[in-house]
Amino acid sequence: MKLLIKIVILASTVAVLSSDTFAQTSHGSGSETPTTSTFVKKRYNIKGTWSLTEQDGQTVIQFNDDFKTKGGPDLKLYLSSKALSELESGDVENSSVKLSVLKSNSGAQSYIIPNDVDLSDYKSVIIHCEAFSVLWGGFNL
């Protein structure tokens, strides 16, 4: 039943994953095969794809070579307990945990999810300008 709910949430966005792929992501099968999908715009366009993989016992979010977005003064990457469709800029600080400063506004880059973070507690990964409280966009998990 939980899997069905997650698929319904994703079906309303650009990022639609198959149930087989979603089971791999949600349950951490340890497979090196990535889960791949596209970004969703909130305020600014974000182009490209991302992957979620397990590498050496750690979960890694990988932005692929085709990743590109508008530059900003203080872009950060967050995990949010809310789905992207439910988020507004003012919600980010209260519903999210900061993962990292965005390394670049284009190209391949990776972010390790800390071992003490349970991805099943989060519904989306977002890019947010912390200085001006602007939600760029992101993707649903």
Image: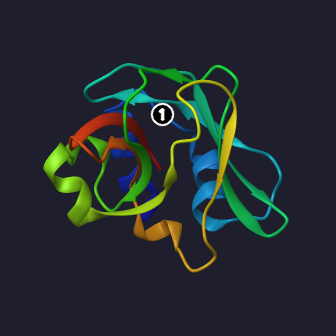
Residue at screen point 51% across, 42% down: 102
Within the image, what quadrant is residue 71 found in? top left
Q: How many marks?
A: 1
Residue at screen point 68% across, 55% down: 60
Q: Position of residue 124 (x, y in %)?
A: 40, 51
The front one of 16 and 130 is 130
Q: Position of residue 100 (x, y in %)?
A: 51, 55
The front one of 111 and 3 is 111
Q: Secondary structure at mark 1?
A: loop
Q: Is residue 88 visible?
A: no
Residue at screen point 64% across, 46% down: 21
Within the image, what quadrant is residue 84 found in? top left
In the picture provided, is 108 more to the left or to the right than 86? right
Q: Quadrant of the N terminus?
A: bottom left
Q: Is residue 84 above or below residue 71?
A: below
Q: Residues within 10 Å of mark 1 (few under 14, many from 20)?
A: some
In the picture provided, is 5 more to the left or to the right than 32? left
Q: Is residue 16 above or below residue 69?
A: below
Task: Give the amino acid type for the residue marked by disc 1 in the picture.
Answer: Val
Q: Position of residue 120 (x, y in %)?
A: 48, 68
Report which residue position mark 1 lands on. Answer: 16
Q: How is the image coloured?
A: rainbow
The front one of 105 and 55 is 105
In the picture provided, is 19 more to the left or to the right than 127? right
Q: Is residue 24 above or below residue 62?
A: below
Q: Is residue 95 visible?
A: yes
In the picture provided, is 58 more to the left or to the right than 95? right
| Residue at the farthest bottom position | 116
Q: Position of residue 107 (x, y in %)?
A: 66, 25
